[in-house]
Amino acid sequence: MSEQYPIAEKIPTEVLEAEVKQLEALKAKPPLFRLGGYLRMGGPGFMDSALTLGAGTMTAAMLSGAIFGYKTMWILWVSMGIGMFMMAAMARFTCRGGIPIIAAQKKYHGWIVGGLMTALIGNVAVAVIFNYGQVSLGTHLIESLTPLIGFEFPRQINWVLYMAVTSVIVLSYGRKGRRGIKFVESFMKVSIGIMLLCFGACLVLVGVNWSEFFRGIFIPWLPSGVEGLDLFIASSAAAIGVMDWVFFNYAGLARGWGKKHESLARFDIFIGLFLPFILVNYLVLSVFAGTLHQQGIHPETAPELAQALMPLLGHTWSQVLFYIGFLAIPITTTVGISLAGAIAIHEAFGWKPNVNSWRWRICVLLPQIGFLAVWYPRPVWLVIAIGAFLSLTNNIVGWSFYLLFNDKRVLGENKNRSYIWNLGILLQVTLINCIAIIYVFNRLGWWIK
Amino acid sequence: MVDKMIDLDGRIGPLPARAWGLILNFIGNALAVYGGIGFMQDGSRLPILIIGVAMTLVCLLVLAKPSK
């Protein structure tokens, strides 16, 4: 299992060795210099945050801001913080032994857990079904943005542009060895930068109630009763899940990361995943807390929320900025989930990923079927079925990762030795357990109505 | 105490001890949620809630022990 991941095979050994030397040289540099170097060399963490910051997460942030104001901001860092333990475990699998996590699951826990629950349900089905939401939001945003800059571009036509841009980017991944990977990673980094700049500018315009802001971050508050329990469990378990864990592992393997990259991987998880996720969510939530919440306006869908915000932003340029920042969200998520889905299909069936093969291209473009979202809503029965499978299997995938992380046969001497690390992983597993339990209780009619 | 009595690296029947621990934790979580629903609705099921929370805590604290 220690042989190099096929996508990384195209990276010349000299390049990997040079990167290791650069990392070692960085250790002796002052913190600011090191930060710059790590930012340049990081990537999989940024890919993960760009994937996670999708239509669903943004709708949740906008709704939380519009309904509860700043009060639920603490949930974001708590839930992402709990998720960091599992992400660090993924860095360990990647850097110590180059272990592809799904292959390890298939070997030690069987195909049902690795191939079916993790790869096909946790990644492929999610990629295909959830891309409907991304395309729907992305095309809505293009349709709303273009009149502000002087022309009409309805979604019945602009889906072609959305599909073309995202397809070109996903097809670039891994091509020409390191360059293709670097291109996609840089695209994700720049997109996150655009989100931060655009939403940041809108927030400056709207203004922040700083005392409420800091209270929201540091003082836990939940709506009373079952609504609060629902909100906390759903937010905590949904911040990062199976796809983020798996994708980070494989994106690191595709970079050829080894033992000496583990500190970079951990930095990447914090600076690339944790911080952008928290900051983008804080900015969006604060914009809505400072506007729609004050006015008592609570639309339910993302396009409605965005449209309701526009008159409150005032200037046309600020509306354009908001739409541009917002558009980066579905685009990067489509790119991320398409790659995660393609990697997972290959792992489920034991295929060697070759980015130049037709099989890879078909797999990576499979989620593009989401273009149908322009005319039809997602098939409800399919969403319900996938939601049920996900709710009932995600926790078992978490169990499997915890067991592998503590298994000497898998990681040898590099297996986990930290009590706190295990406790953090178990906390996240417990939250995902609660999602499965609540799903079953809902079906049985035991959950509070 | 409990973790000294249980060999987490060994097997109990068809599954590793840790896997049984995860199953017990899941049962504890289910009891805690079931008890919590009753308690929030009408103040009932408090014993179930306490047993569920206690089971969850014990499982987490025991299972967090790294293997030897």
Image (cartoon, rainbow, N blue to C red):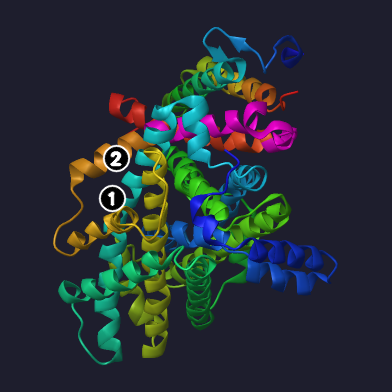
Q: Is residue B13 above or below residue A367?
A: above
The residue tagged 1 is A129
Looking at the picture, which amino acid does disc 1 mark? Ile
Q: Residue at x 64, y 24 (%)?
A: B57
Q: Are marks 2 and 1 on the same chain?
A: yes
Which numbered tag is attached to residue B56?
none
**Foreground of the two, A187 or A234:** A187
Q: Secondary structure at mark 2?
A: helix
**Foreground of the two, A253 or A72:** A253
Report the magenta residues as a range: A392-421
Q: Position of residue A208 (x, y in %)?
A: 56, 74
Q: Residue at x 73, y 54 (%)?
A: A260
Q: Secondary structure at mark 1?
A: helix
Chain containing the residue with disc 2: A
Q: Residue at x 71, y 49 (%)?
A: A259
The residue tagged 2 is A386
Q: Quadrant of residue A58?
A: bottom left
